[in-house]
Amino acid sequence: MTEQRILVNIRNLSKLYPASTGIFSKSDVFVHAVSKINLQIAHGESVGLVGESGCGKTTTGKLLTRLIDPTEGSIELDTEDGVVDIAQLKGNALKRFRRNVQMIFQDPYESMNPRLTIYDTVAEPLNVQGIGSVPEREERVAQFLETVGLTPASSFMFRYPHELSGGQRQRIAIARALVMEPRFVVADEPTSMLDVSVRTGVMQLMQDLADRLSVTYLYITHDLAVARYMCNRIAVMYLGKIVELAETEELLHHPQHPYTKALLSAVPVPDPTFKRKPVVIKGGVSKPINPPPQCRFYPRCPLADDFCRDNDHPPLEDKGGEHFVACYKV
Amino acid sequence: MTNNDKVLEVKNLTMHYMTRKGPVYAIDDVSFYVRRGESIGLVGESGCGKTSVAISLMKLLPDNAEIINGEILINGHDLVPLSDAEVRKFRWRHISMVFQAAMNAMNPVYTVEEQILEAMRLHRPEMSDKEMDEKIDHLFELVGLDPAFKSQYPHQYSGGMRQRAIIAMALSCDPDIIIADEPTTALDVIVQDQLLQKVRDIQRQLNMAMIYISHDIAVIAEVSERVGVMYAGQLAEMASTEAIFHHPIHPYTMGLMSAFPSIVGPKTELVQLPGEPPDLLNPPPGCRFHPRCPYATDICREKPPEFKEHAENHYAACWHPGGES
């Protein structure tokens, strides 16, 4: 990865939400949804962001697409106009940025306007960005519908979302995100609402398109088994922090952070003869409301000692072979 | 094996939903049984009829649903012809259910304790208040909740705690069989793991029969002794968990197994099943799986296969079990 060109460079990115909202009082209590994360994504790779609900993975995705504004930090994106800091974009520059970065949402039933035809849905980004004439747009939409496996395109163009199955809708969502030929796509749980027999097809489609259109993905998921098939590298998040980052098979076979180990041994295995290792951590995830400076995982960690309690959250360090871990005990 | 071994026996169950567009054939001629103390998994994709089976067994059917044919025998008593009032005597006491959406399964204005008491007062009138109180403490400990929380309201519980409370409630009247419909689906993986272990322990400890319904074959692999695979309102295959996972003979089961990703073992290529599940308003003739089946021949397109025993205790509805011609 070192020789490859960096597409997205996330530095010290944070997003804090006020935890109590009074009308007159200014809140001094914050949920640290994303807390000073650093991550580099190279051109053409797909990185998985995994973690449990509330760990900040969706917030990170929304920050990278600038659907929300970061509290601090920078997100540098390599565009045709040179490297720009997404966090500082305004006005026309922000609009131009949206040609480069798109998002695929989880729920294909909620992410589409039920009153728009499939053509209007997929053509909307082209209209907004003013790309092409009407016949050109039609041709491009048709081409992308065929690309995502909805053939013949003419039989889908003027139908409405409710006439399609979940798998077909998610293909529309993929077509809509890719019709701009973006460089970077944030996919937030794109297959978690789909059934197994349909899911595999959508996963394969996303990988094919990544190769053909040279798209880079950030793949947000709670499902490590899906991440294994979709991602070159996996970053594990816990309460707003990236706690481990490594190449996919390395992370799955040699996890080092105690949280990653627990997460991996909790995943059910589709083989009745397989015996999983017992999960050693206790309790559930809390909310990162004004968290103490110590390691976020300290309260649940089986390895924690006084050093972990008395020091700040450990930095994400390379423990060899591009395997990054944020833990003092590794 | 005598008949008494079977806590639940479902024979030729057929259920339709009436819609404006016509009947939806949600359950079509489904037969299976559950032995005392046995844990059965029902697995299938959305719309395959697994939840319809659960609500039919509980006779908690919406107004537009109708059981057209078949028997639901609980300890030999058929629930199908019974009136609502008569069925109520069976619910909770003999058959109870854990629902998927734990938040919606509890009444927000009553404490958890009051809700469990309500079920017990109705179905276990012989118990004294003191006995019930002790029973609730015992149930809380059984599901891994601190009895000190019993006087709290559902919203004060976390998702995992609520799901545990629902399980405690389902166990409150000592049912012979419990139906768990996707009880862990909304939970995070570590909480899910804790709950799955709890469910498995309780089921063994109480020697209670259980039907565990899930779309997730990995979860089913962990909790079930036998597994039924449903497709488009029918049972496609039913056998021991070991046989279903290692020697499936129905092409749909075979397809599911090779489409399901795992984090352990070598990274094998996932094979996609072609097409999508059929519309149950208008299911395909013959075998309902034939439009997606790689082994389909003329007979599959014309005649529905019988659900029959192909090897010992290994049932499947297929003209070409294992892909043979």
Image (cartoon, coloured by chain):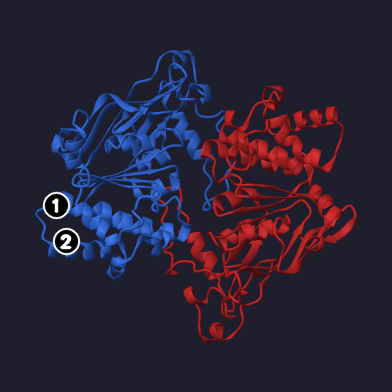
View extreme (right): residue: A81
Question: Toward which corner of the image does residue B30 lie, by quadrant?
Answer: top left
Amino acid carrying mark 1 in the image? Arg
| Label 1 sits on residue | B124
Q: Could you tell me which chain the residue with mark 2 belongs to?
A: B
Q: Is residue A159 visible?
A: yes
Q: Is residue B163 found left or right of A205 in the rendered image?
A: left
Please determine whether, in this image, residue A31 is positioned above or below residue A50: below
Question: Toward which corner of the image does residue A309 lie, by quadrant?
Answer: bottom right
Q: Are marks 2 and 1 in contact (CB under 8 Å)?
A: yes
Q: Position of residue A48 (x, y in %)?
A: 64, 55
Q: Position of residue B38 (x, y in %)?
A: 25, 45
Q: Chain B colour?
A: blue
Element on which disc 1 rests? loop
Q: Is residue A284 found left or right of A113 in the rendered image?
A: left
| Label 2 sits on residue | B132
Q: CA distance from mark 2 to mark 1?
A: 9 Å
- Residue under the image location 27 percent in, 35 percent down: B59
Q: Chain A colour?
A: red
